[in-house]
Image: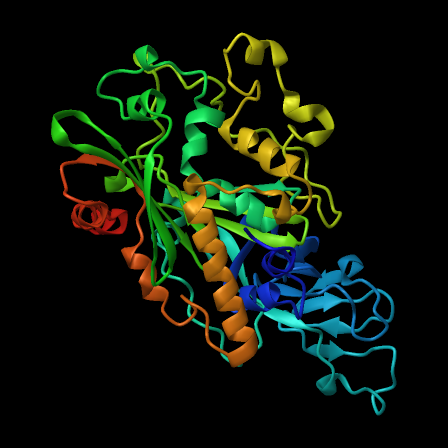
Amino acid sequence: MTTASEGQELTRVGPGTPMGELMRQYWLPALKSSELVAGGDPVRLMLLGEKLIAFRDRSGRVGVMDHRCPHRCASLFYGRNEDGGIRCVYHGWKFATDGQCLEMPNLPPEQEFSAKVKARAYRAVERAGAVWVYMGARDAAPPMPEIEATLLPETDVALNFTQRECNWLQALEGDIDTSHFSWLHVGSVKPDQVDADNWLQYQVSNRAPEYQVSDTDWGTMYCAYRPAEHGATYWRFAHFAFPFWTFIPQGDFVDRVIARAWVPMDDTHVMFVGFSWKQASRTAVLKGGSQIPGSTPLPEYQPNSTDWFGRWRPVQNASNDYLIDHEAQRNDVIYTGITHIAMQDQAITESMGPVVDHTYEHLAPSDQMITRTRRRLLIAARGLRDKGVVPPNVETPEIFQRVRSGECVLTAADWQAAYAQRLREVVHPELLAAE
């Protein structure tokens, strides 16, 4: 069982907290590049409990900094985006994208001291259509993670942002809980609705898989498996990678180029950021090519607003009960009555409350991946806090080259042999592009 004190360590992400300091060791995908227009409006950005602004100056450089002007703490959200930086409208002090004060026009020239003032700013880079932010204290930022889906050309990447109103950990744990797929998402699907050569048949005919779970260099890994025909096994491989990455198994292992980040905004809000190769295989459909009930395209979003939590909010939310259709649920048309797989997950994780009280849980053998991942997170956060141990993946960006998720049917003798065999056969889209 996860104790109350362990729950506090795992879920709190503000400055000075064990998990918050762990998160600050890594690059965080924070917003879409398209959200920032050169010379355009600043954007309020909540990251790890800190209120920031992000803007793109007129030359295209991105700045991410504390929203408070270091002069009198007026919000730079109201600042003027001018040549070379942002100008506070209170007294005209101007700051470059790296936070350096450039001008103090309300002071006589002999009294100004701009060289000595710097707003708290964080390093930012752009990759795969996203702005990434490093909030750590290192003089030199660590290398960017070499996650396959984020290394593709921007035109080949499907990028999705969705905000959830709950703690980051409970949202992430939905991605590493494989048996829920057979219930939450396809609970109404019967075996006779699925073609014999469709791997979905294994999930709807056997809704209680066996598991293998292991620590890895990058985090944790699980394999869920079920018997298949002719002595073969249906395998589903998935991963957690520090600090908040998940690699989910739905899709053919051979071309499943995907990565999902659960970036904490604060203790009770998380931004999901999904990267996936546009050419990869998709979730299995039913006979005749029909979609899984409730599996609609991407959810609809409310218009973005300018408040701290105003970005990428789904139309389906707690205030309208996620537009649940109880009639569809009663008639077993859609198991949950909620359309869209991501919204089914969102409804469940948000229903747990802003931060789960882990002392109420009764964890089962099917939760091995969750308990193992929590343990890994606690060990890493405590190691950093108590001994200054650098957490996994910070200095080994290449470690992600060994991470691939997905499903397959093989006659391999054991799960690790099956994973190794399939890893040798994977498609690398960047190599295809180079041919």
Residue 80, percent from left and from top:
76, 61
Give the residue displayed 87% in from the left and 77% down from the top.
Answer: 106
In the rendered structure, the answer to whether residue 383 lies left or right of residue 204 reads: right
Q: Is residue 311 above or below residue 301?
A: below
Residue 179 visible at all: yes
Give the residue displayed 53% in from the left and 67% down from the top.
Answer: 381
Q: Is residue 172 above or below residue 378?
A: above
Asked where in the image residue 347 lies, by quadrant, the reply is: top right
Asked where in the image residue 15 lies, by quadrant, the reply is: bottom right
Residue 57, percent from left and from top:
63, 62
Residue 32 visible at all: no
Residue 388, percent from left and from top:
51, 79
In the rendered structure, the answer to whether residue 6 lies left or right of residue 193 reads: right
Residue 258, percent from left and from top:
37, 45
**Camera-side residue: 86 or 413?**
413
Q: How many marks?
A: 0
Give the residue displayed 54% in from the left and 33% down from the top.
Answer: 345
Q: Residue furthest bottom?
A: 110
Q: Is residue 254 above or below residue 36?
A: above
